Amino acid sequence: MRMTNKIMQNNSLYNINNNKVLQNKLSTQMSTQKKITRPSDDPVIAIRALRLRSDVSQITQYYGKNVPDAESWLKVTADALNTTTDVIDDMLQQCNKGSNKDLGVENLDIIVTQLKSLKDEFYATGNVDYAGRYIFTGYRTDTTLTYTENTTQDFKITEQINVSAIDMISYTSIGALKGISSVNYDPTDTGTVAISDTTIKNSDIHRIRLSYDDLKDGAVPNVKKVDSTTTPPTETDLFATAIKTMSASAAPSPYANPYEYVLDNPDEVVLIPETGELLIGENAYASISAVSTSTEIRVTYEKNKWEEGDLRPQHYFACTDQTTGVQYNEGYLTGEGALQIIQYDVGYNQKIRINTTADEVFTLDVDRNIDDLQNALAALKEIGQSKTNLDNMLKGMKEGETGYDKLKTTAEAADKAYTYIRENMQKMFEGLLTKLNGTLDNTSVAITDNGTRGSRLDLISNRLMNQKTTFQTLQSSNEDADITEVTIQLTSMNYSYQSALLATSKIMQNSLMNYI
């Protein structure tokens, strides 16, 4: 093969260019500290880099964002639940004080006032939020647990209970002793009849206590029992008689006091809208007592006035906003309603529940139990005032005077009524102790569950940290250039380049003309 100077020159320039390309590649690796700058440099490294970067990105999302957000949510929940525990402990202390039989009306008034304030704080704790999201309201994180101001909103509410939820209250009939004083009672008047203690009776009344009081005027509740053995379940009236609506404060003619009316008419069922109570006559109760205690009862009623601190019904019941037509929790009635659990993705195919729902801790019965105590205290104050008035009247008379015996008999009746009502209130405090302990147990379970989730999240966080370190190490090993090796190669290429230039310069100096 004939080798000319031109060929040697071209080959030299070609090799110098290749040398320069390799030098540029090493220089680029030195400046970027990466093995490749484009996929075509090394397809294997490029494919592996894409996979590792995807893994690192996912772990960074889990470890850097999801896990800290979940940890913060759980911490806020734990703080709120601990506050709730402290509030319940304070309520239990007040109930222990109230269970002292020697306390008078004034002391009981202070205790009930304290319990009401603590109850308000109990439910206010349910409005705690994290980053603008309310933590106890399930999926409705933009809605407070309670109303924050007085408002009107017409809700049709369906409560689902069972026969065992029908409880019993003690009621003392005081008759004409109500509001008695020297102004309206003159024992010296021959037309005035003495009120004997035999007319004072303490009776038990069956009732269904609804979750809300102050119900909508004129809206009679619909009470059904559900037969779940049929498909679909069938609903039938629980009571054979129509429900009457009677006021607790100003009973309309021809009805008397609703409690006494039910005692006198055992076949009747009476709704008291102000207190949210369905009073059940003895015969009416006997007709349903044979029904299994687990039988579901659905009570549908309306409420349109809400006060600050009232719990929103959409967090607890199947209900409908009568103004907008929006339905809430309709699945509760079909058995398809699920607990509104919020879960965070905290790892590959790993989710953790972060929320505690209101019905697990902030049940409505705490509010209603305090309402019962307030009503009982009002009755005790009323009979206590009558008793004081009669005692003062009795002190102003001497034994043997006209009307003295009549007044003494009436005062003894008032004393008996006061004793009955005080004993009833004593039982209510004792019962509230048991119920609050149950609430405390529920809160303890919620704290334990929340703490367990937190412990599990710590384990997941530690594992994610290790995984992130591992994948970042693999990513670095795959993509990052060995700077020491690149430096040596670049230095070697510089020497080779300089040598090539020197050799080429020698070749380029000679041509065929030098030999002619």
Image (cartoon, rainbow, N blue to C red):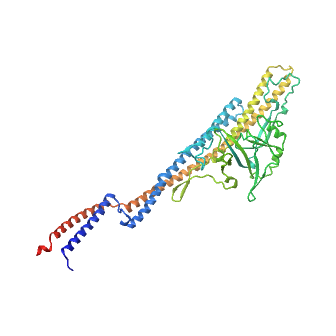
Q: Position of residue 389 (x, y in %)?
A: 77, 25
In this image, 215 relative to 410: left or right? left
Q: Position of residue 23 (x, y in %)?
A: 27, 63
Q: How many marks?
A: 0
Residue at 75 percent of width and 37 percent of height: 424
Q: Is residue 209 above or below residue 22?
A: above
Q: Position of residue 280 (x, y in %)?
A: 79, 44
Q: Is residue 1 above or below residue 182?
A: below
In this image, 48 relative to 344: left or right? left
Front residue of 128/459: it is 128
Instruction: Look at the image and tell me in which quarter the N terminus lies.
Output: bottom left
Q: Quadrant location of residue 383?
A: top right
Q: Position of residue 481 (x, y in %)?
A: 34, 61
In this image, 65 relative to 330: left or right? left
Residue at 75 percent of width and 49 percent of height: 163
- Which residue is the extreme one toward the right? 190
- Which residue is the extreme one toward the left? 516
Front residue of 514/406: it is 514
Front residue of 153/84: it is 153
Instruction: Look at the image and tell me in which quarter the C terminus lies.
Output: bottom left
